[in-house]
Amino acid sequence: MKIIIFGATEVGCLLATEFFEDHDITIIDKEENRTDEFNKLDISFIQGNASDIEVLKKADIKNADVFIACTTIDEANIVACLAAKKISGIRTICFVGKEEYKNALSMERNEGYLCDFFIDYIIWPEELLTEDIFRIVTVSHALDVENFADGKARLLEYKVEPELPIVNKKIREIGFTKDTVIVGLTREGQLFIPNGETEILAEDKLIFMGTPHSLDILAGTFFHRKELVKSVAIIGGGNVGAMLAKYLDDVKIKTKIIEKNYERCQALSESLEHALVIHGDGTNLKILDEEEIGSSDVVISVTNNDERNLLCSLLCKQLGVKRVISRVSKVLNIPLFEKVGIDVAISPKNSAINEVKNDLEENNVDILATVEQGQGEVLEICVKEDFNDKLVMDVKFPARAIIGVIQRKNQVIIPKGNTQIKTSDVLIIFAKAEDAELIKEYFG
């Protein structure tokens, strides 16, 4: 596939790094924005502005498959995508940073609006980040949460605390809850797929797939997390903070927001029906103490500054908050946040990259989610006739992978070894990212 990326930004670099090994990548931007990271990749670099028709022609736009605009200027991205669409009818993906652009550009062509060309996919990273955080918050103490099969199946990731009874036990000895399967284990930053003989150690991160009800039982039985999230404090009342507050209000979670800009506080008070809006600085320990932030079940720091988010998160930890989620703008800072004790460090850019990966996958093999900074992938594969009536235990993958869920019409099955696979079943498979292509090829 030939992919043209407009924008030598961090997002552009992440996309190029993700796809250059398997695809033909061309970057368009000014020469001064070209960093050493791009020079390390086997890609083409064209100097110029993709809003310029001649630059697009130089990039061979008519023979490209996908055009992605991810500069830091929304208007430049929009114009470039429209120009690319007008010239070649190419699939266009446009990054924007403003909600009004997302709403305006997402209007369906069949809604009665007159237009002869359009942008295929609008990505607003802050919206994706908000959705990711909301899923994590609403499942108590999970490090990651993904929903599949219209919510009938779920992936959860938990950290193994030293005091848990499963520490130093083999997986086959534990007997995890019915309708759940452990599909991945991360130890010292490295993900692998365990088997029955794998021994669980303190500080491991375990990844499960199963039905929502069975995973709730799993959490209460093995991870001693019976309490529900009842109160959340949000530091930062920007787009993400405001959207999160609305989402949490919908599920009746008590929410308070700390925002240092007074005018923004007024706007939040008018738009949020139940959330408590506090005018103050989230880096001020006195304010955090006075507002009893330490009693919150979860604190989420989502300002647009990594240093402030890190400081706020550490102060909240000092006040006794058990679970802190922090927004990280620079993807390279995520390991630092995790190393100093932040429970969940999450980046809008990572959320957006995952969305692009999902969009570019072919129709019959879809990446539903990625975990552990892209080390693991959840694949969705439709079964062909070759595998009809084959037992799960008889499926011999060319690399380690686990069938976590079988979706059969409206039914969701958490398979065992003797579960039969039927034609037209949809398999949800967990594999390491480096083995995903082998699994896809195995299913044709």
Image (tube, rainbow, N blue to C red):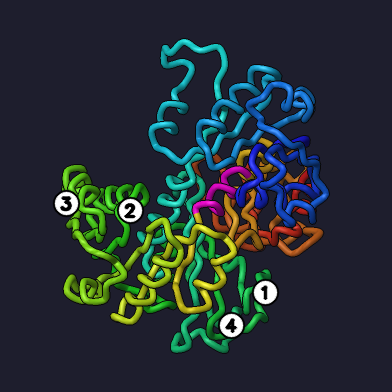
Numbered range of the magenta stretch? 348-356
Q: Mark 3 vs mark 4: which is more N-terminal? A: 4
Q: Amino acid at mark 3?
A: His
Viewer-proximal residue among 200 and 305: 305
Q: CA distance from mark 2 to mark 1?
A: 40 Å
Q: Comparing marks 2 and 3, which lies closer to the viewer?
A: 2
- The residue identified by callout 1 is 195
Eyeballing the image, is 233 above or below 120?
below
Q: Secondary structure at mark 1?
A: loop
- The residue identified by callout 2 is 241
Q: Comparing marks 3 and 4, which lies closer to the viewer?
A: 3
- The residue identified by callout 3 is 274
Eyeballing the image, is 188 above or below 412?
below
Q: Secondary structure at mark 3?
A: loop
- Could you say where residue 247 lies in the image, as x and y percent from the top left? 31, 49
Q: Amino acid at mark 1?
A: Asn
- Which quadrant of the figure contains the N terminus? top right
Q: Mark 4 vs mark 2: which is more N-terminal? A: 4
Q: CA distance from mark 2 to mark 3?
A: 14 Å
Q: CA distance from mark 4 to mark 2?
A: 36 Å
- Could you say where residue 15 lies in the image, as x and y percent from the top left? 67, 48
What residue is rendered at 70% in x and 58% in y? 433
The answer to whether mark 3 and mark 4 are in CB contact below 8 A is: no
